[in-house]
Image: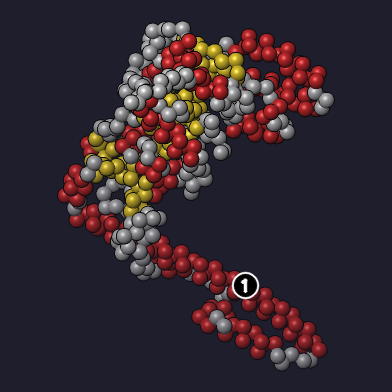
């Protein structure tokens, strides 16, 4: 499962949201870049399903931007790309697709036949050995003048493999019929992975610039650079939840709220956050970027403070 | 004819007398500071309380004192202590800083950062540490359990290192907030604020 998708990963920008449609990309982003996003896809038959969602993965604008800034992904204007792409498809592409399907079918057929051959060969070998053993026995028996049962037993074994019987009796040493393999009919298959008609890597003229992000982006980038996994914080009434590792393995450490450097801060917000955080065994983290310092990377100039109830 | 009975004016409260007896400053938070100090002293039994005026661009003071028992232990520090069979009572108490604030006070991240910059860091602690070293030795002599004393010494040594590397959290203070609306009802709340991402305690 360590396959790395082609970089940069295309992130589809659709109706103001950012999506990733490839499983390989989704697992890669989570594993290598600590970007989890939110799975949003439901099954067509169960549209009311709202847990255990599937592809596509929706990314926060912050996540999308971070990935683009790291050079891991690019943003694609999906609507434009689909429209233009479908128009440029020609008869040639249709034929190519069918051909590909057929070649996959042939491959599957060949695979199956090869397996059959292997089974057959194995069985023949066994019969051969049995025959030898029987012969040896027979010669032994002839010497002793009694061998009525041996050929009968052999027949019963052979009859289990009806279609091989003729070849088995005639030329056992060369049962290979690989010359006929190329001519087999293609199997009618449904590919397990469907590939889009359009190329996975859209051409550069469909790329669009960096996503617009909220003012909390520097704090997001800062925490991400420290190895935290960040997810949307609606559940705890904050901006982000910060997990020290993959959310499947860890509870979150912080309820994260971003604030401007000289923005008026209601201390009651700090108290409320601190109290809520402690109540759910988390810290409350408030932070923001010092605008007087110029960052080399997003998040370099961030200062953050962790708050917990003192218990007194 | 009713003769009004003269009602004596009540004695001002202990807090009021403390505030009026305090030297007047132009710091608008002076009353808040004294109220928090009073609360620390009498409700939470802190000792050797001091007020420090900060040289920040906005008026701010800090209170420092020694709590009767440990207020904050970093989870990793706690683990370290548990592994060596040390209890919180075995370790000597540290001076802690308290930032007094009042509900509705103007505040911002910039101000918070300025207060933290004014706090003494681990390097500044070194002199104090050296001073306290003598005390550690005293406790070692007193301890009947030599093994424990060795572990304590190991702990102090590691703590000095951990403070420098900020392994057990960086600078920290207690944010105290009081309510003065409607005359105030005497509540003071305390929150531990630490610089950076310090993982939460296992409450």
Locate the N terminus of chain B and report the quarter of the image it occupies.
top left
Residue extending farthest front:
B1
| Pointer 1 chain | A
Q: Nearer the viewer, residue B45 or A225?
A: B45
Q: Quadrant of residue A223?
A: top left
Residue B171, percent from left and from top: 52, 20
Q: Quadrant of residue A153?
A: bottom right
Q: Nearer the viewer, residue A208 or A253?
A: A253
Left or right relative to A141: residue B31: left
Residue A195, percent from left and from top: 32, 53
Please indicate, yes or no, whether residue B90 appears anywhere in the rendered image.
yes
Q: Quadrant of residue B108?
A: top left
Q: Nearer the viewer, residue A178 or A77?
A: A77
Q: Residue at x 48, y 34 (%)?
A: A283
Q: Nearer the viewer, residue B136 or A146?
A: B136
Locate the C terminus of chain B and report the quarter of the image it occupies.
top right
Q: Secondary structure at mark 1?
A: helix
Q: Residue at x 29, y 32 (%)?
A: A213
Q: Is residue A207 above or below residue B37?
A: below
Left or right relative to A145: residue A188: left
Query: What residue does disc 1 label?
Result: A125
Q: Is residue A255 above or below residue A39?
A: above
Left or right relative to A136: residue B15: left
Dot 1: few (<14), some (14–19), or many (≥20) neighbours within 10 Å?
A: some
Residue B32, percent from left and from top: 43, 18
């Amino acid at each position: 499962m360590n396959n790395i998708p082609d970089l940069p990963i295309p992130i589809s920008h659709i109706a103001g949201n950012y999506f990733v449609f490839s499983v390989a990309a989704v697992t890669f982003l989570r594993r290598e870049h600590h970007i989890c996003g939110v799975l949003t896809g439901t099954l067509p038959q169960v549209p009311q399903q709202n847990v255990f969602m599937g592809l596509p993965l929706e990314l926060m604008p912050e996540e999308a931007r971070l990935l683009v800034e790291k050079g891991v992904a690019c943003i694609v204007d999906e609507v434009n790309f689909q429209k233009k792409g479908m128009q440029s498809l020609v008869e040639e592409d249709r034929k190519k697709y069918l051909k590909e399907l057929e070649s996959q079918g042939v491959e599957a057929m060949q695979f199956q036949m090869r397996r059959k051959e292997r089974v057959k060969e194995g069985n023949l070998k066994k019969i051969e050995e049995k025959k030898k053993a029987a012969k040896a026995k027979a010669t032994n028996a002839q010497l002793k003048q009694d061998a009525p049962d041996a050929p009968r037993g052999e027949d019963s074994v052979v009859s289990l493999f009806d279609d091989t019987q003729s070849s088995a009796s005639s030329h056992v040493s060369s049962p290979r019929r690989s010359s006929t393999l190329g001519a087999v009919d293609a199997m009618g298959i449904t590919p397990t992975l469907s590939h889009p008609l359009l190329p996975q890597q859209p051409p550069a003229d469909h790329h669009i610039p960096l996503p617009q992000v909220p003012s909390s982006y520097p704090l997001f980038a800062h925490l991400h650079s420290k190895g935290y996994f960040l997810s949307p914080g609606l559940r705890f009434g904050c901006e982000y939840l910060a997990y020290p590792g993959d959310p499947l393995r860890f509870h979150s450490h912080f309820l994260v709220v971003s604030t401007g450097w000289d923005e008026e801060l209601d201390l009651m917000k700090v108290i409320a956050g601190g109290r809520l955080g402690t109540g759910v065994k988390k810290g409350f983290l408030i932070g923001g970027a010092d605008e007087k310092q110029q960052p080399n990377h997003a998040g370099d100039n961030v200062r953050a403070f962790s708050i917990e109830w003192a218990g007194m | 004819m009713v003769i009004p009975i003269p009602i004596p004016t009540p004695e001002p409260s202990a807090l009021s007398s403390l505030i009026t007896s305090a030297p007047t400053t132009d710091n608008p938070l002076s009353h808040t500071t004294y109220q928090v100090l009073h609360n620390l002293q009498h409700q939470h039994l802190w000792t050797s309380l001091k007020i420090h005026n900060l040289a920040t661009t906005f008026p701010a003071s800090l209170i420092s004192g020694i709590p009767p028992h440990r207020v904050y232990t970093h989870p990793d520090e706690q683990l370290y202590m548990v592994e060596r069979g040390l209890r919180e009572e075995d370790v000597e108490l540290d001076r802690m800083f308290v930032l007094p604030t009042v509900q509705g006070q103007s505040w911002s991240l910039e101000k918070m950062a300025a207060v933290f910059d004014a706090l003494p860091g681990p390097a500044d602690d070194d002199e104090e540490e050296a001073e306290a070293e003598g005390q550690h030795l005293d406790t070692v002599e007193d301890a009947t359990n030599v093994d424990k004393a060795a572990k304590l010494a190991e702990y102090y040594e590691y703590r000095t290192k951990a403070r420098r590397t900020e392994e057990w959290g960086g600078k920290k203070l207690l944010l105290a907030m009081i309510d003065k609306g409607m005359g105030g009802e005497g509540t003071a709340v305390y929150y531990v604020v630490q610089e950076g991402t310090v993982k939460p305690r296992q409450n």
